[in-house]
Image (tube, grey):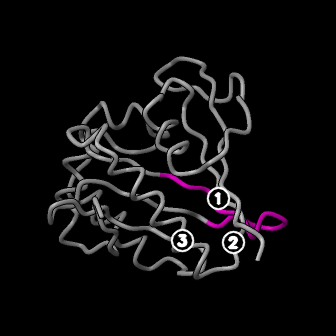
Amino acid sequence: MLCELKKWALEDAGALALMLSDKRVQDNLRDGLPYPYTEQDGREYISAMLSADEDSTFAFAIIYEGKVIGSIGAFRQGNIHRRTAELGYYIGADYWGNGIMTEAVKQLCAYIFENTDIIRIFAEPFAYNKGSCRVLEKAGFRFEGVMKSNAVKNGKVIDMRLYALVKEAE
């Protein structure tokens, strides 16, 4: 096993701040995160994840060689999409390209499918983020299409790609 997932702890705030203060990481995430990202920002995020509904929010730190190096979470959708979850993740740039994120995605999806009634997990990476798209493909997600001009990031209108993993029928 390349990595393990663990519940966040407040003492992880420093590692979180270090990762999210890297513009290379933030350039691949949705807007709304402070930059630079502080330990206090990390404590607030971790507190929110620890107090969230455990049947709707599945948020974990990614541990590699005993260190927090990334974050992964899936968030249950509402209404008619209540058995669907949106996946989000990032990893420190120093760890890109080593298969760690693919392993983390596989672990989280297996956990969700085994422990909840969720039947579909989807992700919407920026089309230019080839590494993230490859993570999803290697983790068994199917490419469902391009969402043209779906976002504005760093002042540019960009496409996003839709990937999904559907629980096998029992």
Q: How many marks?
A: 3
Residue linked to disc 1? 121
In the rendered structure, does residue 57 fall within the stretch colored magenta? no
Quarter of the image where one finds residue 97: top left
- The foreground one among 14 and 137 is 137
- The foreground one among 168 and 118 is 168
Q: Image check: 55 left or right of 103?
A: right
Residue found 61% across the figure and 48% down from its top: 141
Tag 3 secondary structure: strand
Tag 1 secondary structure: strand
Residue linked to disc 3? 57
Q: Residues within 10 Å of mark 3 (few under 14, many from 20)?
A: some
User: In the picture shown, does residue 54 fall above or below 57?
Assistant: below
Instruction: Return the mark for residue 170.
Output: none
- Measured from the top left, where is residue 114 in percent x and y? 59, 79
Region rendered in magenta: 76-88
- The foreground one among 125 and 31 is 125
Residues under numbered marks 2 and 1 in contact, where contact means CB atoms less than 8 Å apart = yes
Q: Marks 1 and 3, Cα distance to the nearest angstrom?
A: 13 Å
Residue type at mark 2 is Ile
Tag 2 secondary structure: loop
Quarter of the image where one finds residue 81: bottom right
Q: Marks 3 and 2, Cα distance to the nearest angstrom?
A: 12 Å
Residue found 78% across the figure and 71% down from its top: 169
**Which residue is at the far top?**
156
Q: Quadrant of the C terminus?
A: bottom right
- Measured from the top left, where is residue 104 in percent x and y? 40, 59
Residue type at mark 3 is Thr
- Measured from the top left, where is residue 64 in percent x and y? 21, 59
Q: Image check: 25 left or right of 107?
A: left
